[in-house]
Image: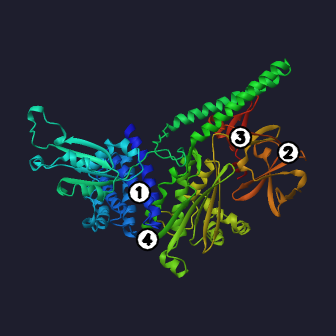
Amino acid sequence: MDELLEHFLLESRDLIAEAADHFSALARNPQATASIDGAFRAVHTLKGSVALFAMKPAERVLHAAEDLLERARKGVSPLDSTNIAALVVGLDQVDRWIDEFETTGALADTAFALSDTVLAPLSGTASDAQGHDTTDSDTVAEWVEALMVREAIALASTDRPLTAFRYQPDPDCFFRGDDPLATVQAVPDLVSVTILPLGGAWPAADAIEPFVCFAAVEGLSAAPLETVRAVFRLMPDQVKFAAVHPVRHQDTKSAAPGATGEIAVNRSFRVDPARVDALGDAVGDLLIAMHGFHALAAEAEHLDAALAAKARAYHANLERVAGNLQLGLGAVRSVPLEQSLRRLPRLVREIAQSLGKEVDFAIDGQDIEVDRQVADGIFEPLLHLVRNAIDHGIESQDQRRLSGKSTIGTVTLHFSRERDLIIGELADDGAGIDATVMRQVAVRRGLLTADAARLLSDPAALRLIFLPGFSTATTVTEVSGRGVGMDAVQAAVTRLRGSITIDSEPGIGTRFRMALPATTLTTRLLVIETGGDRYGIALDQIVETVALSTVKLSPIGDGTVCILRGRTVPVLDLSVLLGGAAATRRDGKLVVISAGGEPVALRVDAFAERIDRLVRPASGMLAQIRGVIGSTLMHGGDVLLVLDLQDLAS
C-alpha cells in the first residue's frame, strides 16, 4: 500500500473517532464550547486530508460541516439537535467513503449524488445564518488556510483566538492619498504581517507601475474582530476577516500540567506491527536464554562456589534488564481499546436504521489499554454481539410501548480491568432470553434429548446459544438469523485465551461478559504434574484449586463427582484425557475450570511452580494434538507443553 495512503487511512479514522466523540458530547450539550472547537478542528483536518485524494464528495460534505461548526463557534448560529444529527450523518457517510476508498481505490459513480443528499440538511441548517454572519462568508476560504499554514509557528505560540485579515487596496489608492502600510500599522496587537503580490508573483522591475498598488497585505492580530474591523472602516470593500482558533499539536499525556507558552512536541510515531511482533519474539528468545543461564549457574555450584556466586550475580542483573525490556515492550504493544471500537457507533446506527429501531448506544472504559493482538481480535465478536442485541434483543417500538418501556432501546458496552484481565460487558434492555425456550429449541433441532434438556440448569441452557447452528430466530434477515454468529463469538474469544458468559432475564434484558487477557506477550502459568509428566496451565483458565484430601469423590454411573460449595461437580482425570493411565495417588489435587459455563474438576498428581513465560503457538505436528495450545522452555531448556483445559474437558 502507498505510504501516503496508509498514513491517510490511519489518521482519518483517528479524526473520525475524535469528531464522533465531540458530536456525542454536543448531543448532550449543544453549547459545549470545547466540543464545538474540538469537532471543528477534527473536521477541518480531515477535510485537508481527503483533499489529497480523489474524494471530492467527501471534501464537499466536510466543508459544509466545517462551515456549520464555524458559525457555531462564533455564536452566530447555535447548534441544535437537527444540525447535530446532520453532522453525524455526514461523518458516517465520510467514514463509509474512506472504507470504500481503501477497498477499491476510488469512490462509486453515485458518490456525488449521495453527497448532494447528505449536504441538503447540512446546507439547509447553515443557510439560515448567512445574513447574520459578522465575518465574510469566505472565512474558510483558501486565503485563510494558506495563512494558517504560513503562520504555523505564530499560531502555535499562542492559545488566544486571533483575527485574520486580508487587505487588498484599490489599485488607484495612492491617487486618493491612501497609505496601505500605515493603515495596517494602525491595527492593534499585530502578531504577523505579510505582503503578497497579486497574481502569485512579483512583476519584473521594468513592468512595475510606481503609482499602482499591485500587492495585498495579510496579517494576524490578537485584537477582537470588531476592533480590527474598525481600522478598515473607510475601505470595507477591500478587506476580508476571519476568526482563527490556533490548533496546538501536542502530546497531551506528556505535557506538564499548567504549562503555557511552550510548543509541545508530538512524541508519537507509527511502527509496523510486524516489527513489534518480531521484537517480541526476540525478547522471548532472551528470556529463554536467561532461564538457561540460571540452570548453568546452578550446575556451577557443584564445581566452584565463587564462580557460581558470580554467575548468580550476572543472572540477577540479566533478569532485571530482561524484565525491564519485557515491561517496555508490553507498553509498546499496548493500544487503547477505542482504536478497535471506533466503528461500532456508526455500525449500530446503520443496523438499527435497517431494522426500523431506535437504539441509544454508549461505550464506557474504551481508554483502557490492552495488547494489540487482543485489540485487533475483539472487534468481530463484539460486532456479532451488538448485531444480535439489536436484532433479537431490542424489541420493535410497538412492542416496547406495550411493555411499558421507552421506544428507544439501550445497548451499553463497558470495559474494566481486573488484575491481568480485561472485562467487557455488553448489555441491552431488550426482551431477554428464556431458558425454557432454549431447551425446547435444542430438543426440536435434535441437539439434546428431552431428558438431557430437562437436566440443564438455566445458565447452561442459556449457553446453548453458542452451539454451532443454534438460533432461536424464526426468520432470516440481512442482519442475523442464519444460525451463525454466536458460535463465532465463542471461537474468537477462545482464540484470545478468554472466556464468555451470558446472563439474561426475560423482559428485562441480556448481558454478555467477556474476560480477556490484558497482554499476550507472556502468560502466567501453573506447572502441574500428571501421569509422570509436567505441563503448563494458564492461570486465567483456573477458577480454583482444591486438595483431594478436603473433598470426597463419589462414583455416579461411569463417572466421578465431588461436592464443591454446595454444587455437584464432575471430576475428570487429566492423565486419562491426555491418553495416559488413570491416577492412583490419593494425595492429588483438583484444578477447577469453567467448561460451557459449568464447573469441571480435573484431577492431577501435584502442583509445581508458577512462572511467567512466552508461550509459542502450537505448530506442525504439535498443532494436531488436542488440548495443546503451545509450548515454552523451562530453566534447564526442557520443553513444557501448555494445555487448553477447556478444550480437553469439552
Q: At 47% from the left edge and 67% from the top edge, which residue is drawn?
A: 28
Above or below — where is 258 with respect to 461? above
Q: Disc 3 or 4, which lies upstream in sequence?
A: 4
Look at label 1 and name its amino acid: Asp
Q: Give the residue pinned by disc 4.
A: 356
The amino acid type of the residue labelled 2 equals Ala
Q: Nearer the viewer, residue 430 or 440?
A: 430
Q: Earlier in the sequence, mark 2 or mark 1?
A: 1
Q: Earlier in the sequence, mark 3 or mark 1?
A: 1
User: Mark 3 highlights which residue?
Assistant: 642
Front label number (2 vs 1): 1
Mark 4–mark 1 Cα distance, whole angstroms, equals 33 Å
Quadrant into which the N terminus falls:
top left
Q: Quadrant of residue 243?
A: bottom left
* Observer-nearest of 155 and 61: 155
In this rendering, which labeled residue sits more in front, label 3 or label 2? Answer: 3
Along the polypeptide, which appears first: circle 2 or circle 4?
Answer: 4
- The mark nearer the N terminus, 3 or 2, is 2
Q: Position of residue 299 (x, y in %)?
A: 82, 23
- Give the label on residue 37, or none: 1
